[in-house]
Amino acid sequence: MKKLLEYINANVLFKVANLNSITIGIKILAGLLTSKAIAVFIGAEGMALIGNLRNFLSAVQSFSIAGFYNGLVKYIGQYKDDINTLSKTLSTVFYLGFFTSILMSFVCYYNAHIINDFLFSESYNYAYVIEVLAIALPFYALNMFSFSIMNGFSKYKILLIINIIGQILGLLITLLLIWQDNIDGALIAVVITPSLIFLITLVGILNRKNFTSLVKITNMSSTILNKLSPYAIMAIVSSIAIPIVLILIRNYVISNVGIKAAGYWEAMNRISEYYLMFINSLMALYIIPRFAEIHTRSEFRKEVWNFYKSVMPVFAVMLVTIFLIRNVIINVIFTPEFRQVESLFAWQIAGDFLRVLSMVIAYQFLAKKMFTHFIILEIFLFVILYFSSIYFIDLYGIQGAVIGHCFSYFLHFLIVLLLFSSSLFGVITESDNT
């Protein structure tokens, strides 16, 4: 036991995880309390409608920032000592991101009724929620731009404080709105809370005026745009396609199984989101930067197997524990109305385990800028996820949605293993590169 503890304390993976644990813990707690409030005051039907709105908001937010901000973090770190290039980078991303967010706002505002029918069907009239979303969208884009600047300059303490305050503020507003207006309040909370954090972020940015002085419309650069375009395309493909696929699947469940069943599936997705939050953050903080540094197949293989040996057993134990206490989890997070969610755990957990196994290797696409491979594989995943889910839903009802999830990530994992088989299993010589 002593050797194990020493290993955990010395292992860089666990050190990285600790840096973000406070923010993630608060985010999970806020999510759990919000889910409980939705379950108590609104029920399974409302859970399904809120799920569609959350997925749509995620897609719209990703498109509104044009997918530039992941690349921005990378290039701020690269050019932070080159004021001229840094100014061009910040200016290009800011004005293009702000333009696309305004454009998306107009599209959403003037098509609110069409979007309402797509998300909620003609039986509900929440077009005003889409209009509120449209007004809030530019503030979200500004917040993400500000976050990217601070992240690029490694202002982790400021980001931590902003995240904590933002999560608490968002939680309080969400609970208040749900308590006052039930489903209407919950829907409004979904669209406004991400943008409200901008008010907090603005204080952090204004206190560092040297950042804002670098943003000038005359410094926009086509060269910078070309460098950021691959990141934009990848972000748009992955961040928009999966929420839309989830909406389509959920609408199919509503039409063919029932809206309550769709609410149970959304509840399962929320639970999955909570336990994946930590490991996703860990991979984003460690795996991508580490893969970008390594240049040989042996190093790549070592990092992958190191992650599998050190993190995946812990993750597996956590998943098994979650499965064994699923009844307690449902009672704590939701209400007895959601008892049918128990039948969804096994396939969802199996799919999530395969998903993480696959993601660890697939991050190599991002680290080594294998953009074409990444996009093709992502599109394949979304297509398989949709059609397999529909097929299994027709056979097994709501349980088919989680079976489709597991099946899709099983195929995804096999393809990733095939693509990197020589790096992971082949004979390695000293001259071999990743």
Image (cartoon, rainbow, N blue to C red):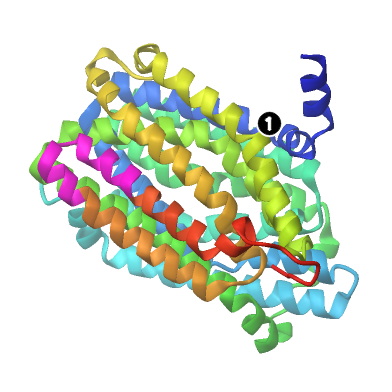
**Mark 1 sits on what residue?**
21
Instruction: Report if residue 397 lies within the magenta region.
Output: yes
Q: Does residue 105 appear left or right of residue 77 in this picture?
A: left
Residue 88 shows in the view? yes
Q: Quadrant of the N terminus?
A: top right
* Of the pair 132 and 214, the residue shown nearer to us: 214
Instruction: Report if residue 318 lies within the magenta region.
Output: no
Q: Position of residue 63 (x, y in %)?
A: 46, 66
Asked where in the image residue 69 lies, by quadrant, the reply is bottom right
Residue interval drawn in magenta: 390-407
Q: Does residue 345 appear left or right of residue 366 in this picture?
A: left
Q: Secondary structure of the magenta portion, mostly? A: helix
Look at the numbered disc 1 and give the secondary structure of its residue.
helix
Q: Position of residue 183 (x, y in %)?
A: 28, 33
Within 10 Å of the Cα at label 1, are there few (<14), some (14-19), or many (20+) other Cα atoms?
A: some
Q: Residue at x 38, y 69 (%)?
A: 106
Q: Residue at x 80, y 74 (%)?
A: 86
Q: How many marks?
A: 1
Q: Position of residue 253 (x, y in %)?
A: 16, 43
Residue 119 shows in the view? no
What amino acid is found at the position of numbered circle 1 in the picture? Answer: Ser
Q: Quadrant of the C terminus?
A: bottom right
Q: Position of residue 304 (x, y in %)?
A: 65, 49
User: Looking at the image, is 145 positioned above or below residue 158?
Assistant: below
Q: Residue at x 67, y 62 (%)?
A: 427
Q: Residue furthest front?
A: 427
User: Looking at the image, is 242 positioned above or below residue 336?
Assistant: below
Q: Residue at x 81, y 57 (%)?
A: 153
